[in-house]
Amino acid sequence: MTSRWRSCGRWDASQRPEVGALHHLQILDVGGNNLEEIPPEIGTLQDLQVLDIGCNLKDLPTCIGSLSRLVRLNLGGNHLMEVPTSIRPLQNLQNLSIANNGLQELPSWIGSFPRLRELYAGRNEFTGLPPEIGDLAALETLVITNGRLARLPPTISRLKSLRRLNLENNQLMELPDAIGDLSNLEDLNVEHNLLEILPETLGNLHNLTHIDLGYNHLRTLPESIGNLARLKQLRAIFNKLEELPASIGNLPQLEVLDLRGNNIVRSHKCYPATITRLRALKHLWLQYPDDWQTKSTPPWDVIYAWLLALDKQGCHVIDPPDFLFPEYYDDPEDDNDDAFYEDDDNDDDNDVNEN
């Protein structure tokens, strides 16, 4: 049976002996307290596997390093200015959160955790990652959101086990070509950055199923995007897209396509006719010309016929041209256009730390 100890209120010095006596304790949660220091008695808990100390800490004692069985450590929501060196000996760590602190940089030894599978480091102050980040051979999830990250090192290409990369709401102006070497990546989120162009190597991510490019400065998508045969969701809302590559039609499993808030229609261009090859769509959000006369103008006529076919097969064509689906505008219940945007993440325990 797993032994747990959780404090939901203020944890004071009088409880130190009580904790030190729990020699077989496996889970200790003192997050949300007003702790400013960790009692050394914690270092005697040799069976401890999960430790949550999201408090008011400015540093950690060296005794933390003696918790050799620790697999999950949450240091999120403290006042740490640097990653404590006391955690470096924890070679069995699989899940580490250092999010929501005041970290100015990540140390080079951050790559020294051979079993680390999940790293959460959002809401900090660092602008780059050390090259040694690429040494995390077992890493599957990397979340660095709501920060000042401006660049990725080329060594990120060595994260061959990475499946989820969330860099939402940072200051990235470009992605390195090395991003294309993440052969197992399934979910990429770079929403709310400063990206103006994407590397063609993006098309090498053959296992990618979800990509979110929203709220950047993209004017086009790479032609290689058509190589993402397993892609199910493509969101590129509120960019500056003026055209789409013809290869957009080569995504046989695409279920969600959201391109609202772009410049394709404003620049008096049209979507490529190849877009009509997308027959697996369940949710579609495009923009259309205001002039209803375009319904008989190539290639818009082909696209409108495609929209009708999608509608008949059950696709949710959101905000369609009024002349094509006039009943859409007459249905007062069909006004929740964002209803299909559900959180695909299953890391509920880490949500407070990755934002």
Image: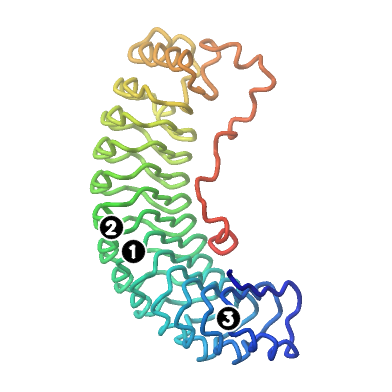
Q: Nearer the viewer, mark 2 or mark 3?
A: 3
Q: In the image, is residue 314 above or below residue 176?
A: above
Side (left or right) of 26 relative to 204: right
Number of callouts: 3
For label 2, the residue is 176
Q: Nearer the viewer, mark 1 or mark 3?
A: 3
Side (left or right) of 351 relative to 193: right
Measure the C-alpha gap from mark 2 to mark 3: 47 Å
Do the residues under discs 1 and 3 have CB atoms within 8 angstroms?
no
N-terminal of the pair, mark 2 or mark 3, is 3
Q: Amino acid at mark 2?
A: Pro
Q: Nearer the viewer, residue 73 or 226?
A: 73
N-terminal of the pair, mark 2 or mark 1, is 1
The image shows residue 169 at horizontal and vertical percentages of 49, 56
For label 3, the residue is 24
Q: In the image, is residue 348 above or below residue 222?
A: below
- How packed mark 2 is, by other alpha carbons closer than 10 Å (few <14, some 14-19, many 20 or more), is some
Q: Amino acid at mark 3?
A: His
Residue drawn at (50%, 18%) of the image: 290
Q: Nearer the viewer, residue 74 or 29?
A: 29
Residue drawn at (51%, 23%) of the image: 316
- Please, what secondary structure does the residue beneath circle 2 have? loop
Do the residues under discs 2 and 1 have CB atoms within 8 angstroms?
yes
Measure the C-alpha gap from mark 2 to mark 1: 7 Å
Residue drawn at (35%, 31%) of the image: 253
Q: Nearer the viewer, residue 298 or 131?
A: 131
- Please, what secondary structure does the residue beneath circle 3 have? loop
Query: Is the N terminus in the top left, top right, bottom left or bottom right quadrant?
Result: bottom right
Which disc is residue 27 wearing?
A: none
- How packed mark 1 is, by other alpha carbons closer than 10 Å (few <14, some 14-19, many 20 or more), is many
Which disc is residue 152 wearing?
A: 1
Q: Amino acid at mark 1?
A: Leu
